[in-house]
Amino acid sequence: MNKGFIFDLDGVIVDTAKYHYLAWKRVANELDFDFTLEQNELLKGVSREKSLEILLDIGGMIILDSEKKRLASKKNDLYLNLIESLDYKDLLPGTKSFILDAKDEVIKIALGSASKNAAYILKKLGIAHLFDARIDGTMVSKAKPDPEVFLKGAKLLGLDPKNCLVFEDAKAGIDAAKNAGMKCVGIGKSNILKSADLVVSGLDKITVTEALSILKKQHTQNE
C-alpha cells in the first residue's frame, strides 16, 4: 500500500523562524511597539496575513487594509533579504538523509507549508527535486489548523489521507494534520506538541521504520 510523508517547512526542514521573527520585529518597531520571541511563538505555522493580524492585535493597532498590504509586503521583502544567503548547510540535522531513506522505501514525499516562499527556499536548500508534490501558501486559502494544505498534499500524492504521516513543529500544524485524519510527528518539545502521535527533537532522532510504525498503528486502529 502506498504511503506518504508530508513535511512542514520552517522548523522541520530548515530553521528560518529567526528570520521571520527579525522581519516581523522590524515591522512592529515601525509601528512603534516591541515584539518578543515569546510572542513570535503565536506566529508559527500561520500564514503571513494571519501573522500580521496577530501582530497588530499585540500592538493594539487598527489600520486600513491598504496599509496591511504594504506591511505584509514589507515583511516579505525583509525576510527575503535575510534568507538570501540560505543554502544546503542550513538544512536541519538529518533532514536530507531521512527523506532519501524514505524515498528508498518508495514513500511519496510532499511539502505542506503556509510559506509563500517555499519553492524559493527548497531551491536554495538544493532539495526541491526530492519532493513529489508541494503545497504552499500560494495554493491554499485557509490557514492551519484548517486541514486544507494537508488534504491537498494527499490528493496530489494520489493517497488516502490515512496513509499520510505529517511532520510538524507547530501546534496549529499538528491540529491541521489531525483535522485531516492524519497521524503526526511533532518536531520540537513534547510539552508544547503533546497532541502529536510522537514528538522528537528533529528528523535526526527518528528512523523511517519508526515513522512507518505510526502509520501501521493507524491502520490497526481502523480495522
Image (cartoon, grey):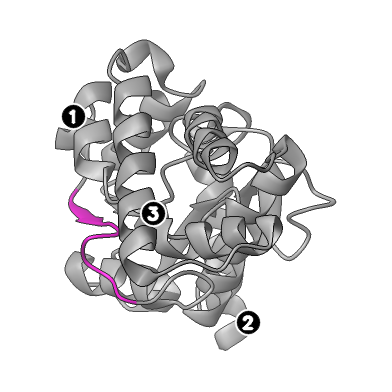
- Residue annotated with mark 1: 123
Q: CA distance from mark 1 to mark 3?
A: 19 Å
**Which residue is the extreme one toward the bottom?**
223
Percent position (x, y) of residue 145?
54, 73
Within the image, what quadrant is residue 152 found in? bottom left
Percent position (x, y) of residue 6?
38, 55
- Dominant secondary-structure state across the stretch colored magenta: loop
Dot 1 lies on which element? helix
Q: Which marked residue is nearer to the observer: mark 1 or mark 3? A: 1
Percent position (x, y) of residue 170?
61, 54
Within the image, what quadrant is residue 193 found in? bottom right
Q: Residue at x 67, y 43 (%)?
A: 33
**Three-letter amino acid code at the position of disc 3:** Phe
Q: Quadrant of the N terminus?
A: bottom left
Residue nearer the viewer, 41 or 195: 41
Q: Which marked residue is nearer to the observer: mark 3 or mark 2? A: 3
**Three-letter amino acid code at the position of disc 1:** Lys
Look at the image and give the residue range highlighted in magenta: 132-141
